[in-house]
Image (cartoon, rainbow, N blue to C red):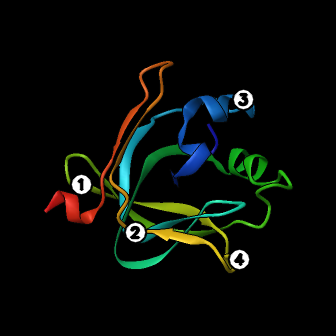
Amino acid sequence: MAEQVTIFFYGLFMDPQALEAKGLRPRQVRQAYVERFALTLGARATLVASTDGVVYGTIMRRTHAEVDQLYSDPSVAAYRPEPVLAKLADGEGELALCFNLPNPPQGRVAIPNMPKRCKRSLGRWDCQITMSQDRK
């Protein structure tokens, strides 16, 4: 089997069904979060540094070819990988790559502390999105 890397996904790609729609079979999907980042929303979502931010998503193991395939689409080709420490529900940390826009467009809205519950009615997808102030 080809070498795999751990990827932290947020936004649409954290949904295994979204990846399946792009022809990828999600494997080893685990809920995770990264600290010191905020999710910014605009025409595209991206993460930006934020001292008190937390962003929830998933981590998955993917081959380099799968990652290249996913990020070759023109809509996400500008995203670049950067290393992050993804934390799992049990507190364990795992090094992962996270794809972000290197130069987020101006006028984006950073959301460092956005308490909200998101659920998908299909499948087993259920993620709790709480931010740092809610976990204290």
Question: Which residue position is annotated with label 3?
Answer: 21
**Amino acid type for the residue under numbered disc 3:** Ala
Please give the residue where the numbered disc 4 appears in the rendered image. 105
List x then y, in percent, for residue 22: 74, 34
The earlier-in-sequence mark between 2 and 4 is 4
Above or below, 133 against 64 in this view is below
Name the residue carrying label 2: 112
Q: Secondary structure at mark 3?
A: helix
Q: Is residue 86 left or right of residue 76?
A: left
What is the x, y in percent for residue 46?
Answer: 59, 65
The mark closer to the camera, 3 or 1, is: 3
Q: Is residue 131 above or below residue 101?
A: above
The reply to whether callout 3 and callout 4 are in contact (CB within 8 Å) is no
Q: If you read the primary sequence from the N terminus, does the residue marked by circle 4 or circle 1 appear first?
A: 1
Q: What numbered label is drawn on residue 75?
A: none
Residue found 25% across the figure and 64% down from its top: 132
Could you tell me residue 33's position as x and y percent? Answer: 36, 55
Q: Looking at the image, is mark 3 or mark 1 earlier in the sequence?
A: 3
Residue placed at 22% from the left, 65% from the top? 133
For the N terminus, the image quarter is top right
Residue 5 in the figure: left or right of residue 117: right
Secondary element type, mark 4: loop
Report which residue position mark 1 lands on: 92
